[in-house]
Image: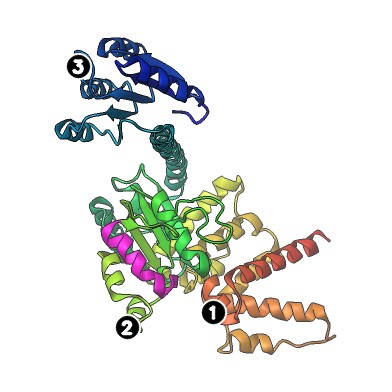
Amino acid sequence: MNKNSIPKILIVDDDYTVLKDLEISLSEKNYELFTAASYKEALGILSDNRLDILITDLVLPQNSGIDLIKFAAENNKIYGSILMTGYSDEKALIEAAHLGVKEILKKPFSDTELFSAIEKILEKQALEEENKRLTEKLKQENIILSQELSKKIKDSLEIIGESPRLINALEKAQIVAQSQINCIIGGENGTGKELLAKYIHQNGPRKDKPFVEVNCAALSPTLFEAELFGHKKGAFTNANESRAGFFEVADGGILFLDEITEIPFELQAKLLTAVEYGLIRRVGDTKDIKVNVQVIAATNRDINSLVDDGKLRRDLYHRLSEGLIVLPPLRERGNDIKILLDFYLAKYEQEFNKKAKEMPKDLWEKIINYKWPGNVRQLTNFIKKWVLFGEDTIIEKSLENIFVEEPEKQGIERVLSFDFIDGTFEELEKAKKLLIYKILDKYNGNKSQAARHLGLTYQGLLKMLKKFEENGKDKTAE
């Protein structure tokens, strides 16, 4: 029943006085009423209408009220029913219960009892229909999102290379995809852990279901539980409406937990329950929700040492690591650097409709022999910049500088050696920028680790980086 529609109610009783009294009582409410004095008359009304509630006396001429409820339910003519009786017929009451009759009124009953029984049924009907509407809406949103995401994933699933370690990782990924087991993907920053997770999604039976990516390091610790498991309206300040968490959104598909080791230890038991039993509970709720989610976790840290140090639950680690894949760093992939270089040069030339400047032989050799601490991500960023800006000799030289081996002094020590000339705030901002970028470099671009090192929040670090970027654009414009 739509919340804006008028409920349709049929009243059936062979006692004219009772029938009239009920009609008068219910006429005070906003209901569309039908009345019948016999089983046969009631059948005629039911054949032409689908009603919200059937209110019937137990004892009727020819057939019983139980027979009428059974007919209406089997033919999908009503949502709910109320049985009126002046008898203590235990057998009939048991049969009514089997038919799903929740409301039984013993004669004589008051108008309050009648109104209460009707409202219970209508509230339950409205709730079920709202849940159905939201479920259908979410399903359609997931279908659309899945289609769009699948296209994006297929367009970007470029796991390029032929080194034995990479091929081995892809073979394991195929097994994880087909068996739908949980998995941990390890590897340095920039090795392609997210890409491999999407590869698993696209090569398994869950490819048409949601792929939900969560950066655990970017989630606020105070809202972590609500983000993962959802929350009920009023569960905490500003919880103005109920909301599904990432596990519910990913139901039937894959939940990718990037930087899994950043999940607060106190929440890991709830995560274990969700992974092991497929049960979650929204914050502020008392009921569990069943979900079917394949969990893929990723980390760039030594997960075994975290388990040994008590920072990651051992049982959670074992449950997630049903599949364990470690992506090799680029420096250990042999000829893959040349393969990647050729592939991405062609890709970005086509993408930007721009022919890249031919690289000098000495620069090419540096690229092939460079260790690439940022791995594939660093290499692809370099190639993109080369295609776009390679003709600019100033930028070209700055790109070449990334291959110069740095002296032992790094990070804070190098920044603190910055020479102040005028002692201005501009120089202070420059030193701050150098410090932050050096710490980012130390952690291979991992912003969450850099933020902890600097004593900043993750969001605080993002704001500072955005400010540096905007200041750089302003100076360029000048």
Circle 1 SS class: helix
Residue 241 % position (x, y) = 53, 50
Residue with the mark numbered 3: 63
Give the prevailing secondary structure in the magenta stretch: helix
* Residue at image location 52% in from the left, 56% down from the top: 234
Circle 3 SS class: loop
Residue 327 or 385: which is nearer the viewer? 327
Residue with the mark numbered 2: 308
Real-space Cα distance between discs 1 and 2? Answer: 24 Å
Residue 350 % position (x, y) = 55, 45
Question: Around disc 3, counting alpha carbons within 10 Å, would you say few (fewer than 14), some (14 to 19), or many (20 or more)?
Answer: few
Three-letter code, disc 3: Asn
Q: Is residue 265 magenta?
A: yes
403 to the left or right of 101? right
| Furthest residue in direction left, as rendered | 91
Asked if the residue under mark 2 is in contact with the one under mark 1, i.e. CB atoms within 8 Å, the reply is no
Image position of 256 with respect to 7: above or below: below
Q: Is residue 377 magenta?
A: no
Three-letter code, disc 2: Asp
Q: Quadrant of residue 20?
A: top left
Real-space Cα distance between discs 3 and 2? Answer: 73 Å
Asked if the residue under mark 3 is in contact with the one under mark 1, i.e. CB atoms within 8 Å, the reply is no
Mark carried by residue 442: 1
Residue 159 seen in the current view: no
Q: Quadrant of residue 47?
A: top left
Image position of 88 with respect to 150: above or below: above
For marks 3 and 2, the one nearer the N-term is 3
Residue 80 or 154: which is nearer the viewer? 80
Residue 455 % position (x, y) = 60, 81
| Residues rendered magenta in the picture | 262-278
